[in-house]
Image (tube, coloured by chain):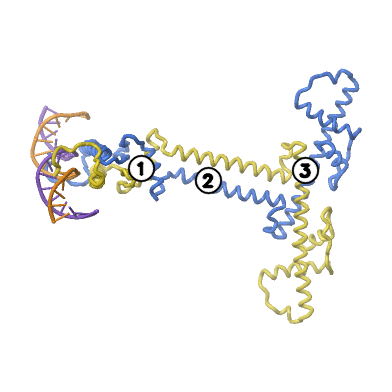
Chain colours: A yellow, B blue, C orange, D purple
Amino acid sequence: MARGKIQIKRIENQTNRQVTYSKRRNGLFKKAHELTVLCDARVSIIMFSSSNKLHEFISPNTSTKEIIDLYQTVSDVDVWSAHYERMQETKRKLLETNRNLRTQIKQRLGECLDELDIQELRSLEEEMENTFKLVRERKNKSQQDIQKNLIHELELRAEDPHYGLVDNGGDYDSVLGYQLRFHQNHHHNYPNHALHSASASDIITFHLLE
Amino acid sequence: MARGKIQIKRIENQTNRQVTYSKRRNGLFKKAHELTVLCDARVSIIMFSSSNKLHEFISPNTSTKEIIDLYQTVSDVDVWSAHYERMQETKRKLLETNRNLRTQIKQRLGECLDELDIQELRSLEEEMENTFKLVRERKNKSQQDIQKNLIHELELRAEDPHYGLVDNGGDYDSVLGYQLRFHQNHHHNYPNHALHSASASDIITFHLLE
DNA sequence: CACTCTATATATAAGTT
DNA sequence: TAACTTATATATAGAGT
């Protein structure tokens, strides 16, 4: 029994407060549900107890997410502002980084060189030359490996006349492709690793790959 | 008087529905307020009528925004709007593009070459060589311009002995800086535009800039 | 409409199990 | 604890103004 007028004032007894919270929460949710059905409305209730426990009510046929979206559309309050602005800033920074990276790539493709001063042109030239050499070196090494593979294959074939009958996988076939074309033009090893100008191995490359 | 048991069922009469909505909304908000005070809780109620009119309750000493922020922190439900999700997607794509661009730049700096096959190495080599030549050409042209400027300056000075007294702007001073250092080592024009190897103008560049 | 009224339904505080 | 009980407070439907 509700003995005596109920005071609307914080319940100091921790246990009573907890019990009342639970009971009244249920009452509130029940009322919200009735309202939803009787009046064809949509209700979202989000509540936190004094111990920060979350409880929520949401009308059927909708979602808290939907209600909050609608809320921030209709009300002047921008619920998402803090998060939104943070994301906008992140996006802005990413786009800028992106632009810078693209400019760098363009310059390394010989475009947009007008924007560079003489110092920048010099360091870019130096960089291009270094990378060019590195890439050529790597390419030659890669080619040499293919050639060594080929020679090894041929030696095996020479030793074992039945070798050619072995059924090889697809990946292996492509290596043989190089080998055959290579042999139309060349007959021995190519130790030339010159980095500063078109070398003998470059010419081989041309034959091999074109 | 509540005559007869109240049916929890949509009120079909528009006016009655509207009146009940208003009354029960007030009741709900009153209950929410009592709960807030009695139990030291925080409550947010957001509701939309069938005609999409917004009404909200929020406990004193807090805000709807705060409750929603807390809600999305505590709950597993992603309450973020479609807008947010779109931004997340944008961010994801930007980060990926960014990664790709960085990889491309690294390869153009001679790093991560292991990841490239022989074809890719060849086209990168070709690209590097082309850009290298373009950059060198541009650098030489830029240098020539500086030299022409210098020669023009010297001719003017020779014609007018008072020229040196003219007060020049800062940008112009830097050009003069080059001119003076250049003149410590060289005394006439450099038509050499060779692209395929270190040229005379490269050596001049060194003197000019170092 | 926006109130007031009022019979009745419902909610609930505190006690009990 | 939580579930049940019950006296009382409160909410509210529908009518009246």
Q: Could you tell whether A81 is left or right of A158 in the image?
A: left
Residue at the image point whose x is 83% and y is 55% from the top: A198
Residue at the image point whose x is 40% and y is 34% from the top: A77
Location of residue A84 in the rendering, given as x and y in whole percent from the top left corner = 47, 39
Residue A156 against residue A41 in the figure, above or below: below
Say which mark, if any, is on residue B90: 2
Q: Amino acid at mark 2?
A: Thr
Q: Secondary structure at mark 3?
A: helix
On whether disc 1 and disc 2 are found on a single subunit, the reply is no
Say which mark, if any, is on residue B135: 3
Circle 1 residue: A67
Q: Nearer the viewer, residue B41 or A161?
A: B41
Residue at the image point whose x is 57% and y is 40% from the top: A93
Q: Quadrant of the N terminus of chain B?
A: top left
Residue at the image point whose x is 36% and y is 40% from the top: B67
Say which mark, if any, is on residue B171: none
